[in-house]
Amino acid sequence: MNRIERMQRIVTDASRADAYRRLEAQIANGAEGPLTDDEVLSLLISLKREVDIQARTFVWRLLCRSKRKDEVRDFALASLAKKSDNHRGLALLYLRLHYPELMPVLAQRYQNDVDPEVVYELTEYVGTSNPERAVDMKIELLPCESHELSDALEIEISQLGNRRHLNELRRRDQAAGGKTIFGRIANLLAERLSDASR
């Protein structure tokens, strides 16, 4: 019985989600070894059966840390195509990490998607060839409901933005009446740009 099969036997949703979360953290910090092929296939079975949203999130994150597997690719493509799937962004992350050759087609297909997690993954892909355009796209995602995504955007825009982005953030803050996320990021970006010019 592999590590994933043991986790599948955990009865309560919260405990199962926590077990997946802990394994992902342990693999990330090297305390646990990488997933085996059997474990990746077990995770795919978990993903197909799992109803708990938190558990599904951590299963996807584990898959993103796994090896490339065509069966998971097919499931990720199907998940991405299903507008009602709550984990479309993680499906696209898996594809971006493991099947970069698909990204030009996927970027074209999903460029007007309304799911902020999907658009965020597209900004990461665009950033590899056009970092300035990626920051423009990240600004367009603001404000967003997800605190995790909002925090990531705040950090990334303030670290990657330039003077044109700063002006756009200030314009949006002013248009929204001030004291918005746009203003907060503008202040961080202005501080970084000021430090860089010294």
Image (cartoon, helix red, strand yellow):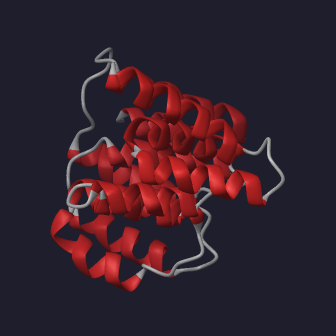
| Residue placed furthest toward the right | 177
| Residue placed furthest toward the top | 31
Q: Position of residue 149 (x, y in %)?
A: 59, 47
In the rendered image, the quadrant that contains the C terminus is: top left
The answer to which image quadrant residue 91 occupies is bottom left
The answer to whether residue 54 of the structure is visible from this angle is yes
Frontmost residue, 111 versus 166: 166
Q: What number of labels is visible?
A: 0
Q: Residue at x 58, y 61 (%)?
A: 141
Q: Position of residue 177 (x, y in %)?
A: 84, 53
Q: Quick check: 121 above or below 75?
A: above
| Residue placed furthest toward the bottom | 109
Q: Position of residue 120 (x, y in %)?
A: 47, 58
**184 left or right, relative to 162:** right
**189 left or right, relative to 94:** right
Q: Quick check: 27 above or below 104?
A: above
The answer to which image quadrant residue 125 occupies is bottom left
Q: Residue at x 35, y 63 (%)?
A: 133
In the rendered image, the quadrant that contains the N terminus is: top left
Frontmost residue, 31 versus 48: 31
| Residue placed furthest toward the left | 101
Q: Residue at x 48, y 66 (%)?
A: 119
The answer to which image quadrant residue 33 occupies is top left
Q: Residue at x 15, y 69 (%)?
A: 101
The answer to whether residue 143 of the structure is visible from this angle is no
Q: Position of residue 185 (x, y in %)?
A: 60, 39
**113 left or right, relative to 70:** right
